């Protein structure tokens, strides 16, 4: 049984502190490849930089019936994160930058960043409050007024370099605070699933790229794997804050602490109802806390995967976390653990007849 | 000259909001104790370090005021485990969403640090007129991620919340973090005290880390009254040129401390300091404050019968954000210039002052 101990915490810390903006996922890819050593039957890095690894099941060597073969199950998690690309050098250590992925620019002023492969520190400063007017402070600071400032000796930084928030992983008892929990949670869970892969399936793990700019890595990964079905492991917002006027918050998406969020429908895909049922029944049978993510906007790599080839029955399961795509997300250790436990239990109990069951 | 950066980083990691300066005062006390002859706390918390001069008693004295308090936030309410807060000192709410903070929770006695984040609720949980505009401070929360019941046990209304951005060095000898305003001046004063270990000085020197500057130059006022110095130098940060800030109110980063001119500053002593900087070839800039200098100097000048006051600035980018930036060499230059000024003070310095009218 996979579980979460110090080794997994250290690995998540390393993954969250790594910088891997869309298209520049190398740092996470390296961690993933290192972790997979000795566990995979096949490892590939494809044309986009996806890591595609297979671990074959070991079931009965002679199938009882020719049709009764092991299911090929693709499980994917994206390695990329939202961030920035430096686009112009203004001199004196100041760089213009663009956002990569969905970032609310109201989260940028006053943040520390790390630039490039060497993680050179920089900051996004603003005009001091003393020099602003009340009117000015009511206006959003536009992106083109912001700069990444790395200090006056800028020789090691150049346009084209990626940057991320500089937040370092921290744990306070049950609470985790980090950048990029979306989707390093998925990566760390998928690594653990892979190392503890159940023998009843052929596990096809896809550590994908470019999820945050349009689910692009998963598209080609699903084509290449051609699986029987797919499970996407991601991190989804818990918008479970109180409203300003005391009205009940009915659009929370998910809530922190209630366990893995099973997707029924989002903007990019409807989950396969058999997979939704399988997951929720196993959670109930095993007493694993879970929640259904409120159907609504957002999306995961399942949006690409379920449309690959002639169609792939897919479902997404996410770890709830607050403040996705900002400098500091907040999550609970137990939600991570329960997501891992549920997914492992669900994979373990997939049998070859699964896809012949009724859809609804 | 010793490297002041490790001490500065320690100091930047300590909280110490206005009125709650003890954590900073402890670190400064440890650093200053070997550098001064006496050290004590004033009635409103300011730290007073005395280096006795070599002159005959009663000696004139110079007080160097560097405020040690920090801006930050304070808990005003708790809703489902999320903390409502107000500001302590001037905070632009636009720098808050996503900022790392530490809540000093007093629910179980001695303040207990709890990591948290300032969060901006999604738009459907905010008044619709806010839209995509900056979210006013009263609608932001601090979230610790802890379950509501735990938060209720730990956190009280009135608990202070400090910024928690760790300090780190940027390229070209610069450093960033929160509360560089005004811990860099405390560091500069420390450089000055270190210089004075091997420099004879006739005057008494009061090294003072003042309290509550950010909420109205409170500690400087009471300390000036208590210590009754002959001259005060208020050493604080000043706005450096940077993105969004390049007008006459800003000075270049890394090109030396500024000597401020204006009604809060004694013009003759200002000129003496300027001449000294020229003579020693210490780079400096001139800064103009036509009214309030926004420093302890504004207060010290009018304590009791009035105290001749100088204001020096260390240029700093992005003041009152968690990512203020200062050039370390400006800290060293400021410390050295003040030390040289002190070492050059003659017993009759004040008597020789003549107004240039």
Image: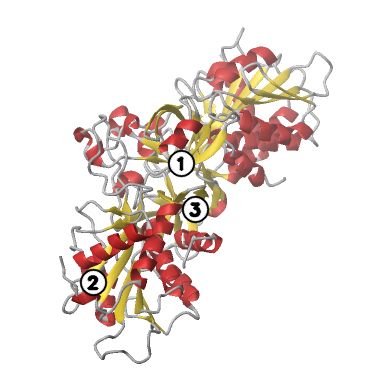
**Horizontal and vertical percent position of residue A330:** 41, 48
| Structural crowding at the residue carrying mark 3, measured as other residues with C-alpha within 10 Å and reported as few (<14), some (14–19) or many (≥20) | some
User: Image height check: is B108 above or below A31?
Assistant: above
Please report the residue visible at 30 percent of the width from the left and 40 percent of the height from the top: B121
Q: Name the quarter where the C terminus of chain A is drawn.
A: bottom left
Asked if residue B14 lies left or right of residue B262, the reply is right
Q: Which mark is residue B116?
A: 1
Q: In what element is the residue under mark 3?
A: loop
Q: How far is mark 2 from mark 1, CA to CA?
A: 36 Å
Rate crowding at label 1 as few (under 14), some (14 to 19) or many (20 or more) other CA atoms within 10 Å.
many
Q: Which residue is mark 3?
A: A168
Q: Earlier in the sequence, mark 3 or mark 2?
A: 3
- Identify the residue under disc 2: A305
Residue most extreme to the top: B305
- Is residue A216 shown above or below B282? below
Return the residue nearer the eye: B77 or B55: B77
Of tags 2 and 1, the one toward the viewer is 2
* x and y, in percent, of residue B44 in the image: 61, 18
**How far apart are the alpha carbons under marks 3 and 1?**
13 Å
| Quadrant position of residue B283 | top right
Q: Are marks 3 and 1 in contact (CB under 8 Å)?
A: no
Of marks 3 and 2, the one in the foreground: 2
Percent coordinates x, y for residue A334 in the rendering: 43, 53
Is residue B232 left or right of A216 when viewed as pictured?
Answer: right
């Amino acid at each position: 049984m996979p579980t979460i101990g110090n080794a997994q915490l250290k690995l998540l810390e390393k993954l969250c502190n790594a910088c891997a903006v869309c298209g520049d996922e190398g740092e996470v890819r390296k961690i993933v490849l290192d972790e997979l050593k000795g566990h995979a039957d096949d490892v590939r890095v494809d044309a986009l930089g996806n890591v595609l690894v297979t671990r074959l099941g070991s079931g009965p060597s002679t199938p009882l019936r020719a049709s009764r073969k092991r299911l090929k199950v693709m499980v994917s998690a994206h390695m990329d994160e939202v961030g920035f690309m430096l686009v112009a050098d203004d001199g004196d250590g100041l760089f213009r930058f663009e956002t990569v992925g969905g970032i609310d620019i109201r989260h940028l002023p006053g943040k520390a960043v790390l630039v490039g492969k060497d993680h050179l520190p920089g900051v996004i400063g603003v005009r001091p409050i003393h020099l602003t007017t009340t009117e000015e402070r009511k206006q959003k600071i536009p992106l083109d007024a912001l700069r990444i400032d790395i200090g006056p000796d800028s020789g090691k930084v150049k346009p084209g370099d990626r940057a991320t928030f500089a937040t370092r992983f921290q744990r306070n008892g049950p609470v985790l605070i980090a950048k990029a929990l979306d989707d390093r949670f998925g990566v760390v869970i998928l690594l653990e699933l892979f190392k503890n892969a159940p023998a009843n399936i052929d596990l096809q793990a896809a550590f994908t790229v470019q999820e945050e700019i349009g689910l692009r890595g998963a598209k080609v990964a699903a084509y290449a794997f051609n699986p029987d079905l797919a499970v996407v492991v991601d991190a989804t917002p818990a918008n479970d804050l109180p409203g300003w006027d005391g009205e009940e918050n009915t659009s929370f998406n998910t809530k922190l602490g209630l366990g893995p969020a099973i997707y029924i429908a989002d903007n990019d895909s409807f989950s396969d109802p058999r997979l939704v049922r399988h997951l929720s029944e196993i959670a109930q049978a095993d007493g694993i806390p879970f929640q259904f993510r409120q159907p609504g906007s957002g999306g995961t790599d399942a949006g690409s995967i379920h449309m690959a080839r002639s169609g792939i029955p897919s479902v997404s399961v996410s770890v709830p976390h607050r403040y996705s795509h900002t400098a500091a997300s907040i999550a609970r250790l137990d939600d991570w653990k329960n997501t891992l436990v549920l997914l492992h239990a669900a994979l373990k109990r997939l049998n070859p007849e699964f896809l012949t069951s009724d859809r609804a | 000259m010793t490297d002041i950066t490790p001490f500065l980083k320690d100091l930047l990691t300590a909280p110490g909001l206005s009125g709650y300066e003890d954590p900073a005062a402890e670190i400064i006390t440890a650093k200053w104790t070997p550098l001064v002859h006496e050290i004590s706390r004033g009635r409103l918390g300011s730290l007073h370090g005395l280096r006795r001069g070599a002159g005959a008693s009663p000696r004139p004295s110079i007080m160097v005021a560097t405020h040690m308090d920090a801006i930050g936030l304070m808990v005003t309410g708790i809703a489902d485990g999320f903390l409502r807060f107000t500001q302590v000192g001037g905070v632009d709410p636009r720098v808050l969403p996503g900022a790392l903070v530490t809540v000093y929770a007093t629910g179980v006695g001695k303040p207990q640090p709890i990591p948290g984040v300032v969060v901006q609720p999604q738009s459907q949980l905010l008044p619709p007129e806010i839209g995509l505009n900056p979210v006013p401070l009263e609608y932001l929360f601090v979230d610790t991620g802890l379950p509501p019941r735990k938060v209720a046990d730990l956190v009280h209304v009135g608990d202070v919340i400090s910024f928690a951005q760790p300090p780190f060095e940027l390229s070209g000898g610069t450093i960033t973090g929160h509360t560089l305003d005004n811990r860099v001046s405390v560091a500069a004063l420390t450089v000055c005290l270190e210089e004075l270990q091997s420099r004879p000085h006739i005057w008494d020197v009061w090294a003072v880390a003042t309290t509550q500057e950010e909420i109205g130059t409170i500690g400087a006022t009471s300390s000036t009254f208590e210590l009754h110095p002959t001259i005060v130098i208020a050493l604080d940060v000043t706005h450096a040129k940077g993105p969004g800030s390049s007008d006459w109110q800003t000075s270049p980063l890394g090109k030396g401390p500024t000597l401020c001119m204006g009604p809060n500053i004694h013009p003759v002593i200002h000129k003496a300091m300027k001449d000294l900087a020229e003579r020693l070839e210490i780079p400096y800039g001139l800064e103009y404050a036509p009214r309030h200098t926004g420093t302890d100097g504004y207060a010290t000048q009018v304590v009791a019968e009035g105290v001749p006051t100088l204001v020096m600035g260390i240029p700093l980018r992005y003041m009152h954000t968690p990512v203020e930036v200062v050039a370390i060499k400006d800290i060293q230059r400021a410390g050295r210039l003040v030390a040289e000024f002190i070492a050059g003070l003659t017993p009759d310095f004040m008597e020789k002052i003549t107004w240039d009218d």
